[in-house]
Amino acid sequence: MGNRDTTLTPKIRSNVDKYTSAIIIGISTFSFMSTVNFLPGAPVFSIFVSLLLFFAAIYKSPKLSSGVLSIIVLISIIYQLTGFQVWSLRSQGLIVVMLSVGALLINLLSARLEATAMAIAVLAVAIMFTPYYYLSVAFIVAAAVVGGLSSIGPVSLTYVLTMIPLLLIENGFLSGIGDQSISSTPVIFTQLVNFSIHMRPPLPGLNILLGWYPAGFFNAQVSEPVINYLSSPNAFLLIVPIVILALVFSLSASMAGIINDMLDRLSVFEKTSKLLKLISPLVASIVTPLAFVILITLLSPKTIGGYETSLTTNSMLSMITASLILGAIFTAREYGIQWLERTEKARIIVMQKIASIIELINVDNKLLSLANAETSPINFGSEVKAIEEIESTMSDIKKGLSTASYETLNNWISELDNNIAPRLKSLPEALRVKVIQELNFLSSLVVTYNNSLNETGLNRTFSDFTETRGNIEYDKALKDYTQLIDEIKSNSSSIFETYKETYNAYNLLTSQPDVLPPVDPARLFESNEYDGGVRLIAEEYWLNFHVKNLPEIESLVDSLIESINPLVDLVDDQTSQKLAYTTEKLRDPKPVNSIQILSEVKDLKTTLDESLGRVAEEITQLEKLVKSFSGISRVISFEIFNTSIKLTIIKERNLGTSPSLRETTKIIDDITGFMRSYRDKKKADESNLVIISQLPVAMKIIGNELAKKRSIEVSSLPFQHKAAITYAEFYAYNNSETRYNDDKEVITRKNA
């Protein structure tokens, strides 16, 4: 109701407004029913109806009560007009009455929307029947204070339209008095004395079946002045004065409403707002009656309005005094409301701030949930704890909100404004900074541990992520953090698998038992220990593995290379080239290269096996050659045949042993010794191979000579002495008709 500040609507103010409306409606009902006769049983029934509308306004709706009051007012006026027999008027007078009643009916029906304003207007009309008629203006102050500017129109219109039929009757009686000056000049603001004197009696009872009208209700002598006035052109003289009265009432009421509204607009600060609300009724109570008196007086001459009033100096002073009293009452009312509602206002403010805090909590919780989902390794315990503490504080405030004192509520408001709200508002930035700090921390760890991996010689890293600047957005920081974590997990898994393979390869190279790493870094990552997981891989595993085992693998590989070098000159060209290539690949060994070293050792063993296989093939071919000459072995001894067994043993050892560096070095040493012996024996057997190559020719020559001679001296054969003896022995071995005398070195035919 009205133009008051509605940003806060405490129940106390609305309840006081409702009770004020109920009181005004009750007083208006009793006053009107007591002054304008209609219903019987005054004053008991009037009090009963007033109380009924009073309680209906409180427990149901002021609109309902004002609607019932408007019906009572309308029917009461129609009832009085009927008693004055206005319905027997000629067309001119009847039209005037019907228009006034119709306008009142329409207004009363619409005025229900402004219950208090309508009731105040009815009260002002009721006062017009008393010697204190001038106090009706004072109630304009009440309308402006209670209802604001929006109530001015309904108050003024309801008052004027309700007064029109009453003024018609009052001026009708005045025209019949005989005073020409009075009869020719209408009166618009005066006590309705004549109406009161000649007012028609009320109904005889509520049961209208017992009788419609009381005795003497229709009195031609009483009604005659009214009928004559309404039938004459003088009735139209009221049009301009009534319009002026409506304008004066509206302007006076507007002055009060405008002042009230202006003071509200000046209420920038809470303290000044309270003060201005307190003094606005007093200011309005002075301005309103002064404006009314000045306007109604200045517009009364015949040249302007052509009406008279009964206002005197005393009545004007009384009007102002009454307005001041009424303004003081409403000032006291406003003070009481402010005093009563300050706690409720504070409570509402606390509730509003709690709602704002809850919104901030929801926003922060969403950000935390997103951060926990995307950056689970980061510990947001302090932020979560802060929100939980704030939520606990909110819960405590809610529990004590209904019983808290004004001082406690103010303390809560201060706490919410100065402590809790700033903490919640700063939380998103704190989360962003924390994510960026953690991101940069992980980036620095990655750089540090990548250096450790580079020190071992490993050509793998955790990530190439660079340090993040501090001005990136929260979403971008979360995205970068997630990307870095995913890269660390993926690269760590790959690096750890490489470590296990390398460690196993190293164990094979050094003849050590296979031992799996005691801790899988993935377990640390699952528990969000990324620092520990990365450090475990880079330092505890790779760097320690490198530092601890570098001297040993360097020594073992150097020994292997030293054992290979002498073998290069003892093997065939193909094997020699492969051995040289392997030696080059094995230089600058590191534990991190154990897989490559193991592969080279395996290839080396394969190369050695192939080389030994070719040696075995040479021996096999020689054996086939020797076997093609039956009995040659009786006369020629091949040393190379004695190496076959040893060759087989060495070959089986090479294939059957693990590719450890020590074992491979021993095998190479054995192969080197074997190849050196094999070379010497092969060289020694080369002369025998030459002898064997000439054997067919020698057999033919010896046969031809024995055909000519019975015996042949070995020295006579065209061969070297050793070869000649060998040929003679082989010929005698293969021909039973001949024999060879070793002492004389002579081959003889037996039958010669």
Image (cartoon, helix red, strand yellow):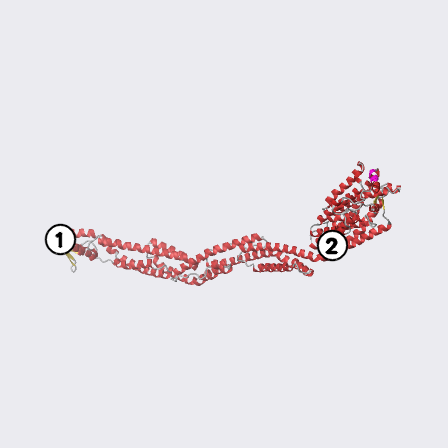
Main secondary structure of the magenta stretch: helix
What segment carries the magenta color? 227-231
**Which residue lies under the disc numbered 2?**
273
**Tag 1, which secondary structure?**
loop
Task: Name the residue located 26 percent from the left edge and 54 percent from the top edge.
Answer: 620
Q: Nearer the viewer, mark 2 or mark 1?
A: 2
Residue 34 image point, x, y percent: 79, 49
Count of marks, rendered view: 2
Residue 449 image point, x, y percent: 50, 59
Instruction: Determine the image quadrant of residue 651.
Output: bottom left
Q: Farthest residue to the top: give it.
A: 91
**Which residue lies under the disc numbered 1?**
709
Q: Nearer the viewer, residue 289 or 495?
A: 289
Q: Nearer the viewer, residue 287 or 45?
A: 45
Residue 358 image point, x, y percent: 61, 55
Assign the C terminus to one quadrant of the image. Answer: bottom left
